[in-house]
Image (cartoon, grey):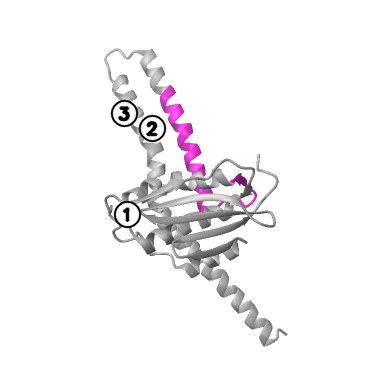
Amino acid sequence: MNSPTTHSAAASAAATAAAVEAARYALLRRLAFAIRHDMMAHLQPITMAGEVLERRLRAPEPKLDDVREGAVRITGFSRTAVRSCLDVIAWLAPDPSQVVSVREAVAETVDLLSSSFGFRGVALRNEVEDGPWCVARTGLRHLLPACLLLLSDDAGPPAEIHLRAQPGDDATVRVLLELEPADGPEGDMGEPPYRPLRQDEVEAMARAEGIAFSREGDTIVLRVAEVRERSA
């Protein structure tokens, strides 16, 4: 028979896990616009190439070379779109075994979000230099977007968020995100497509991923454990 203490601990752990899952769901809802925009950028060329090929086939005497060229273009666009869709799945459910460089982890986050943040008057500045640091992909795929949203929601436009990395203590990497006010148009923050993330939610996600989170004003520091062997 479980003691009241054991039951209370189990209930607390279950509540924490539920809160982390709720935060991850809120994060994905906030990322949905950027993910949709990224997918459309790769799917629309297929439609356009298909329409061109259809017009060529309707010609009284279709030129086979032109038809062949159109088919090759569609094949190329399709392969690119497949890779994009697979990457979208990785945002929804990152592979916990994947290891990437810190520069790559930051770059893929900035590539995904730069357009949507730009519409809101917030510029993302990737200043991470090449280095030997490799980390688990899962943690930063959750924490980097969450921290960017947290900073931008709290401060508002116009602003710039600078992302940097430096070696930490005890085989860790420090990823720094610093928001600075900027000159320029304010953009249109509008209403968030779902709801703002709270800092306690971001902290809970960080703990679940084994990442140390600290914040002082408009600066967030993530301390991430290094992984020695990179994924193939």
In this orientation, which residue lies closer to the viewer: 182 or 198? 182
- The residue to which callout 1 is attached is 158
Residues shaded magenta: 72-101
Instruction: Identify which residue is drawn at 66% across, 39% down.
Output: 232
7 displayed left or right of 110: right
Dividing the picture into quarters, in which one does residue 111 lie?
top left
* Numbered disc in front, either 3 or 1: 1
Check the image and report above or below for 54 versus 137: above
Q: Which residue is mark 3?
A: 51
3D distance between C-alphas at marks 3 and 1:
40 Å
| Residue 93 appearing in the image | no
- Disc 3, disc 2: CB below 8 Å? no
Residue 197 occupies quadrant: bottom left
Residue carrying label 2? 46
Q: Is residue 186 left or right of residue 169?
A: left
| Residue 75 is one of the magenta-drawn residues | yes
